[in-house]
Amino acid sequence: MDETGNDADPNTPDRESSEETDDDQPDRDNFGTDLDDVVLDDIDTGEDGATDEASRGLFDDLLSGEPIFENKEVLRPSYTPHKLPHREEQINNIATILVSALRGDTPSNILIYGKTGTGKTASAKFVSEELETTSQKYEVPCMVEYINCEVTDTQYRVLAQLANKFIEQNRTYIGDRIEELDTLRERATSNPDGDLLAETDFATVDEIDAEIERLEADRAEFEEVPMTGWPTDRVYSSFFDAVDYHERVVVIMLDEIDKLVEKSGDDTLYNLSRMNSELERSRVSIMGISNDLKFTDFLDPRVKSSLGEEEIVFPPYDATQLRDILDHRSDVAFKSDALTDDVIPLCAAFAAQEHGDARRALDLLRTAGELAERDQTDCVEEDHVRQAQEKIELDRVVEVVRTLPTQSKIVLFAIILLEKNGVHNINTGEVFNIYKRLCEEIDADVLTQRRVTDLISELDMLGIVNAVVVSKGRYGRTKEISLSVPIDETEAVLLSDSRLGDIEDVQPFVQARFDN
Ligand code: ADP
Ligand code: MG
């Protein structure tokens, strides 16, 4: 059963597609994939110098065996494209709001909404890079800080991360300033008769020295915030002081902001959104990005109105738009003529069904390319896309099932056992009976039938089972449950869990159904 435990498969594109965390994870997994294809038998290990020959042959094979991809990196989620077709309007809207920062004014706070894969992160990063470049060009002090709240998901960690970034930035700022003053000082001392200082804030060289000393003292005082351990108000004031150290406009981008609110409430947003009234030198503007359209329902009304000063919606892409996006990327990603004509339209069509998700479209295209590579063909065909679609779907299921809590796994296992024994239209009571016996077998707590019903609803929402309420006339209503995922693969994943794997013989459990 372990061979079918696909969760160990190193080639799981869905992990990358899951969310933004991939930015800083170079994808080691895929080396595994490529090396799988090495046919070691072909290597001649016979005579003298054979090892040399052999190792060269090994890599030669791999290199020459790449007729498909020119540059696979550009299909990965970590790649930030410089061109974002069909997002011109949204990008312009964001830029129009943020341009105030370049005039030294505080931009309105912005909330960006849209489903996953609609280009929110890519567009926001694109705009912020442009903003920083332009601010350097015109020497306007303006900074953008990006935080992924799926990773940094508590108020402490958000504030600590921001504080440390600004402290680091202040150190650089002080360093630059001291350098300037040193030069000025040198010129003033080597040319005491000149009127060098007239145009500066300093009347004498001593005053310059005093200023340098003051800056050095400031720099020595900065204390980095540890990742745990301080009281939150101390972290907050470190952050506050660091931001306010010198004049500038700061845009704080909180990506996946709904995850932060879900995990830690809206205190962070409350604190950030009222900072401006207390800051003396700098100004802060917040750009929140959310996959969840309704997340503001959970916010304090004051936070909600402050954060949502400007709202920008990213609609899903349709199939034609996805096709354009893929066309652009594939030019760079694939060798010419590596794609047959129907590959991109099919990837686009599949992803359009998946709520217009560009990430899914790119995943499909990359996976299809990898499958073609494995087949050792020179070109990607429609069928590779279909296989890729199945593979991605299965990988998703495997990942969801693998990370279920134990209790849900037991419930799901009970449903699988019933289906495997030919039971159709399974009802909650039947699931519960098998569930109870499984729990006893592995010494797990037995939840109430009501809780089990809830767990079944959760499995339904995850798309793992389908539970429909059917009316039984005057006998009331019941749920009819069926599995929505491939049974063997799912069972294998469940059995790879060490607790469930302990279940010796599953046959007797099903008997339980008839015992009751
Ligand atoms: P979101 O943040 O809305 O979930 P992303 O910005 O992460 O979506 O986009 C998902 C993937 O699709 C990324 O790899 C991104 O580069 C790509 N992408 C999204 N929109 C476009 C576009 N208009 N043009 C090119 N690539 C895009
Ligand atoms: Mg995103």
Image (cartoon, rainbow, N blue to C red):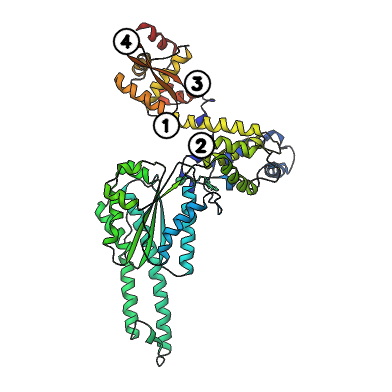
Which label was assigned to residue 200? none
The kind of residue tagged 2 is: Asp
For marks 1 and 3, the one nearer the N-term is 1
The kind of residue tagged 3 is: Ile
At a point 29% along the width and 60% down the height, the residue shown is: 276
Structural distance between the alpha carbons of marks 4 and 3: 34 Å
Residue 312: x %, y % from top left: 42, 49
- Would the CB of label 1 be found within 8 Å of ligand 1? no
In terms of depth relative to the viewer, which is nearer, 374 or 460?
Answer: 460
* Pair 1/3: label in front: 3
Answer with left or right where residue 413 lies relative to residue 277. Answer: right
The kind of residue tagged 1 is: Thr
Q: Which residue is mark 2?
A: 14
- Would the CB of label 4 be found within 8 Å of ligand 1? no
Which label was assigned to residue 474? 4
Q: Which residue is mark 3?
A: 487
Quick one: which residue is furthest to the top in this view? 515
Structural distance between the alpha carbons of marks 2 and 1: 14 Å
For marks 2 and 4, the one nearer the N-term is 2
At a point 49% along the width and 50% down the height, the residue shown is: 122
Structural distance between the alpha carbons of marks 1 and 4: 40 Å
Answer with left or right where residue 165 lies relative to residue 265. Answer: right
Which type of secondary structure does the marked residue at label 3 adopt? helix
* Pair 1/4: label in front: 4
Which label was assigned to residue 403? 1
